């Protein structure tokens, strides 16, 4: 529970989610970064030796999953090395996603890597402040990052510099309510129900179909009951 400085009340956990990142818990803020731990994956040690100033910390998650926090300004360089170095060879990018913890805290960009030849997994994270939500694209390393980065852009509003086709992928291109997985996104959307209904009823088919699909479709004409009956009588 946290005290509301303006009203003297308190926020529940759900109130904090609805309020978004502008409202923080009393015990959040400038919390010290957790210290690094002994890694289980040798790639973590190799990263520290190769990029001593860019590896910020590491931790073990869920008992045996190595997580490394790195400088976002050097993410492409670091991931390129993890991909190309024969002793690392993380040839499969399983996922790119993001996490918004709310409370004004940075957003995390998460890269889940797999080395199929070495049978090893590694999770790499970058923290981005809310006023600088941009990071370099890794589509030049893994082509599969294309749609994954588009999804993060669509749902979290993080820009991937150098992406070949950065646009929404789940929400319509003209979606105007923001980024749905951000903690400052209202639970019912930014528009009223009436406005959401109006937009749904006036949507343009071209927003959901490519021109070829529209050209192939034959319009369905619904005739009035009286007109259809008159034509039947005339034919008899």
Image: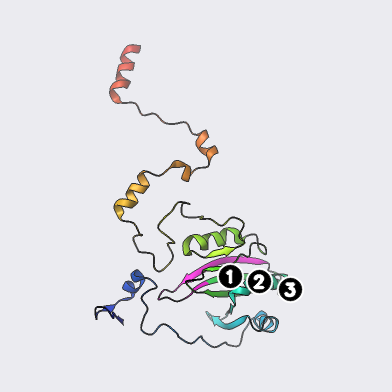
| Viewer-nearest residue: 82 or 192 | 192
- Label the magenta part by its dominant secondary structure: strand
- Earlier in the chain: of badge 3 and badge 2, it is 2
Q: Residue at x 48, y 63 (%)?
A: 157
Q: Quadrant of residue 38?
A: bottom right
Q: Residue at x 41, y 31 (%)?
A: 220
Assess disc 3: are there few (<14), some (14-19) or many (≥20) residues with their C-alpha within 10 Å of its C-alpha. Answer: few
Judged by depth in the image, the label closer to the viewer, 3 or 2, is 2
Q: How many marks?
A: 3
Q: Secondary structure at mark 2?
A: helix
Question: Residue farthest to the front?
Answer: 131
Q: CA distance from mark 3 to mark 2?
A: 10 Å
Q: Secondary structure at mark 3?
A: loop
- Earlier in the chain: of badge 1 and badge 3, it is 3
- Tell me residue 77's x, y (percent): 67, 72
- Tell me residue 140's x, y (percent): 67, 62
Is residue 94 within the magenta segment?
Answer: yes
- On the image, numbered disc 1 is attached to which residue? 111
- What segment carries the magenta color? 91-108
Q: Are marks 2 and 1 in contact (CB under 8 Å)?
A: yes
- Earlier in the chain: of badge 2 and badge 1, it is 2
- On the image, numbered disc 3 is attached to which residue? 85
Q: Which mark is residue 79?
A: 2
Q: Which mark is residue 191?
A: none
Q: Residue at x 64, y 62 (%)?
A: 139
Q: Quadrant of residue 177?
A: bottom left
Q: Secondary structure at mark 1?
A: strand
């Amino acid at each position: 529970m946290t005290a509301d400085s303006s009203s003297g009340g308190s926020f529940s956990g759900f109130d904090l989610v609805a309020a978004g990142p502008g409202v923080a818990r009393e015990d959040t803020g400038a919390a010290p970064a957790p210290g690094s731990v002994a890694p289980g994956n040798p790639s973590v040690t190799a990263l520290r030796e190769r990029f001593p100033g860019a590896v910020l910390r590491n931790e073990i998650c869920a008992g045996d999953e190595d997580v490394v926090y790195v400088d976002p300004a050097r993410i492409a360089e670091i991931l390129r090395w993890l991909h190309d170095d024969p002793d690392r060879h993380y040839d499969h990018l399983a996922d790119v996603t993001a996490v918004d913890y709310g409370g004004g805290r940075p957003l995390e960009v998460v890269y889940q890597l797999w080395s199929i030849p070495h049978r090893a997994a590694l999770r790499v994270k970058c923290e981005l402040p809310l006023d600088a939500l941009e990071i370099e694209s890794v589509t030049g390393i893994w082509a599969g990052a294309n749609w994954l980065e588009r999804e993060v852009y669509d749902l979290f509003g993080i820009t991937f510099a150098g992406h070949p086709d950065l646009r929404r992928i789940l929400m319509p291109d003209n979606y105007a309510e923001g980024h749905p997985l951000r903690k400052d996104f209202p639970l019912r959307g930014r528009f009223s129900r009436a406005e959401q209904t109006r937009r749904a009823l006036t949507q343009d088919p071209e927003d959901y179909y490519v021109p070829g699909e529209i050209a192939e479709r034959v319009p369905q004409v619904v005739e009035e009951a009286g007109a259809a009956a008159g034509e039947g009588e005339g034919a008899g």
